[in-house]
Structure formats: C-alpha cells, structure tokens
Image (tube, rainbow, N blue to C red):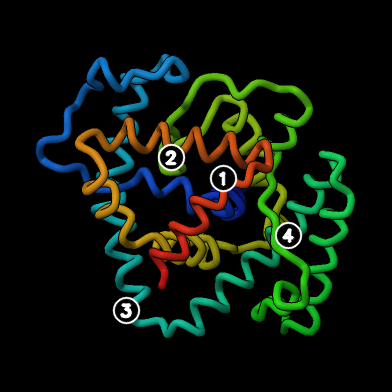
Amino acid sequence: MFRTLSRCCLPALCALAVVLTGCASAPANAPDNAPATTSNPADPWEQTNRAIFRFNQNLDEAVLLPLAKGYKAVTPQPVRIAVRNWFNNLDDIWIGFNNMLQGKFANGVNDWARVIFNSTLGLAGLIDIASPAGMPKHDEDLGQTLAVWGVGEGPFVMLPIFGPSTLRDAGALPVDMAATPLWFVDDTWPLTILHFVHARSELIGTEDLLRQATFDEYAYMRDFYLQQRRYKVSDGQAAQRYDDLYDELND
C-alpha cells in the first residue's frame, strides 16, 4: 500500500498529539480487564483493544519516551519550535484540501495562504508568521471529511503505535499518510524519526496525567479520545479543552 514505511508514517503524526495520550505507563493496580462500569457501547472490540493498548504502553516506555526525553534535553526550545513549525507547515497543505472537500472554502484558502506566507517569509516554514498575522491554524483530516459526508465513525479501534482511532478514521489514515509532500522524497527516514521523537517530546507529562486521573487508564483514554474527536468533527468549541491541556503541559 505504501512505497516505504518512511513515506507512510510521517504524515500521520499530525494527529499524534492525541494518539500518544494513550501511550502512558500503567500503574501496578490498573486492571487488565475493563470493569463493568467502564464498558462503552462504542468499543465492542475492547479485549483486543486493551491488548494493543498494553503493547503501545510497553513500546512507549521502552523506546519512545526515553528518546523523547533525550531529544528534549539536548535540543534548545527555539529549535524544537522551528521543527514543529516546519512539520505544521507541510500539514497545512492537506488540511486545506480537507477544508475544501468539506465546503469550508474560506478556511481552505486560509490554510493554503498560511503555506505561502510561512514557506516564503517564514523561512521555509521554520517560523510561523501566519498565525500572528491573523491566519489561524486548523486541524482537519480525511476522517473528519468523511464524517461531514455522512460516514459513521464505527467502533472504537486501538491501532498499534498510532493509538486510539475509530473504524472510519483508521480507514482514512492511509490516505492521510500518503498526502504529505514528503511522500515524494526519497530517504525520509531521518525526518520520520525526528517527527516521531519530536511529537512524543511535546507530550512528556501525559503519562503522569493519566496515572493521576484514573485507575483504568484505557477506559479514560478511550472515552476522552472519543469525546474530543467528536467535538473536532463537529467543530465544537469544547475541542478547546485538549488545546488548553496541551498548552499547559508545554508551558
């Protein structure tokens, strides 16, 4: 389906801020099976999803989190901001297409104008000059577009590495992953690794948040993800909750 793993993994990370929220270390008293009080009708594959969730936890603890901590320790904050801006600038191209497909033409024009301004005056996207200039950044993907077109979200799905999703969004993910301009660039492994590690570094602290929030991290992560995803699909103002949480963790 993809030419190489390096060309398919990178663009999916535009959603990794939500994905890796579920990749936290489980407390010793966390139950392996969901209590009856946490069952969710949107999660008919809960047993399998929980097994994948534990795999993601182990992967994060053994590989992603140590790399992210090392990266954050040796990389100055201005450099990390420039890295984030550069990847965000690439994301805006596909975000603009999805806004157009959803009929939000003004937003789509805004997204592509961001790319033009940031790619030129913003030194190839390293500096985000569009946001202070009144061109806000949006967050759209094919899953949201399909939702606008009337496709139901389907059951909740826990994806290996990529984390929480729904059947609709998991089906749209390959297209989202293929939509980055880096798809057409050879030898993108360094950028792929950088994107993974950088995205995880921006979520350092979420594992403590989950441990403090609940004894059943899986159920908390699932319900939180579904709530926030539905708000984003409907452009609900309550989606700001996640943005506030993200900003708090990175202060």
**Amino acid type of the residue that numbered disc 1 sits on in the rendered structure:** Ala
Q: Residue at x 32, y 30 (%)?
A: 219
- Using a 10 Å C-alpha cutoff, classify the residue at mark 1 as few (fewer than 14 neighbours), some (14 to 19) or many (20 or more): few
Circle number at residue 73 = 3
Q: Toward the viewer: 177 or 190?
A: 177
Identity of the amino acid at label 2? Gly
Please report whichever mark, 2 or 3, sits nearer to the chain's N-terminal start.
3
Disc 2 to disc 3, C-alpha distance: 25 Å
- Residue 19 image position (x, y, % from top left): 46, 45
**Callout 4 amino acid:** Asp
Q: Which residue is mark 2?
A: 163
Mark 1 and mark 3: span between their CA atoms?
33 Å
| 192 shown above or below 56 | below
The x and y percentages for residue 251 are 41, 73
Q: Is residue 1 visible?
A: no
Of callouts 1 and 2, the N-terminal one: 2
Name the outermost residue toward the front: 237
Contact check, label 3 and label 4, Cβ < 8 Å: no
Dot 4 or dot 2: first in sequence order is: 4
Q: Residue at x 43, y 20 (%)?
A: 43
**Is 128 positioned to the left or the right of 230 in the image?**
right
Q: Amino acid at mark 3?
A: Ala
Labelled disc at residue 92: 4
Of tags 1 and 2, the one toward the viewer is: 1
